[in-house]
Amino acid sequence: MRIRLRLPAWSTFSGVLVGVLLVVISSSQLVHARPVRDYTYTDLVAESDVVVIATALSTAADNGRDFDKELRGLENEVESVITHFRIGGIVKGGVKGDRLSLMHYRFKPEQRPIVNAPGLVRFEAEGPVIGKEERTGQRRHGAPPEYLLFLKVTGDGKFVPTTGQMDPDGSVRRIGGADHDKQEKVKRLGN
């Protein structure tokens, strides 16, 4: 003997309604997300005037510059800076000498995380601490990191990120050395 349970029509409707409401409520947070273009290396090289491998030397505030239109409204959270680099290699374009200065923005040190924040960058001008000097007790640093930079040249000859000032992280790739220990572990796992 088979027993059938019949649910009233309104309960099916209410179940669908609750499901729809849950989807709308959970996806409402996505409405505030800003679109960010996903650049391929081909796109970056094609749209860049200059592509270099460089090491950061220093970063300094650039207080005299007007805020970029992409970042207006974030004046309390970000600051305009110039980072100076020593060029280790040129992949595309031409640069006079072995130095360049990149105009960009970074979050202020005291800034808390914000929703839909721009993809700003900070550059390390010193390598990791690898020890202390025996005589002075000062920290010894390893080699600073190198960066692959995709840049555009402005009308006045300055360098800016190819991906724009709102998301310059798309124009910057930190280049790291090979970790031979990890490579050995991967080889052993593969066998």
Image (cartoon, grey):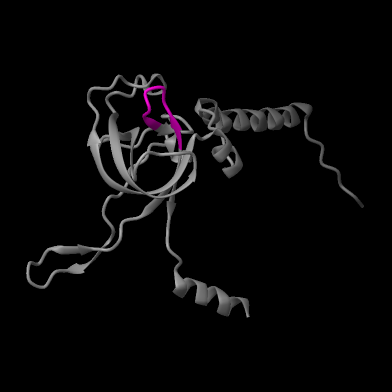
Describe residue 87's horizontal placement relative to residue 131 as left or right.
right
Place residue 188 in its image quadrant. Answer: bottom right
Residue at the location (49% across, 39% down)?
A: 93
Describe residue 138's horizontal placement relative to residue 9 as left or right.
left
Q: Is residue 72 above or below residue 82?
A: above
x and y, in percent, of residue 56 in the image: 31, 47
Work out whether residue 95 or residue 9 is closer to the camera in this orientation and state it: 95
Residue at the location (28% across, 58% down)?
A: 127
Residue 117 visible here: no
Q: Quadrant of the C terminus?
A: bottom right
Q: Is residue 72 above or below residue 53?
A: above
Residue 157 visible here: yes
Residue at the location (43% across, 36% down)?
A: 168
Work out whether residue 104 or residue 86 is closer to the camera in this orientation and state it: 86
x and y, in percent, of residue 107 in the image: 30, 35
Residue furthest front in the image = 96
Is residue 34 rendered magenta in the image? no
Chain part drawn in magenta: 151-159
x and y, in percent, of residue 178 in the image: 46, 66
x and y, in percent, of residue 41 in the image: 57, 44
Describe residue 43's horizontal placement relative to residue 78 as left or right.
right
Is residue 157 rendered magenta in the image? yes
Residue at the location (48% across, 71% down)?
A: 182
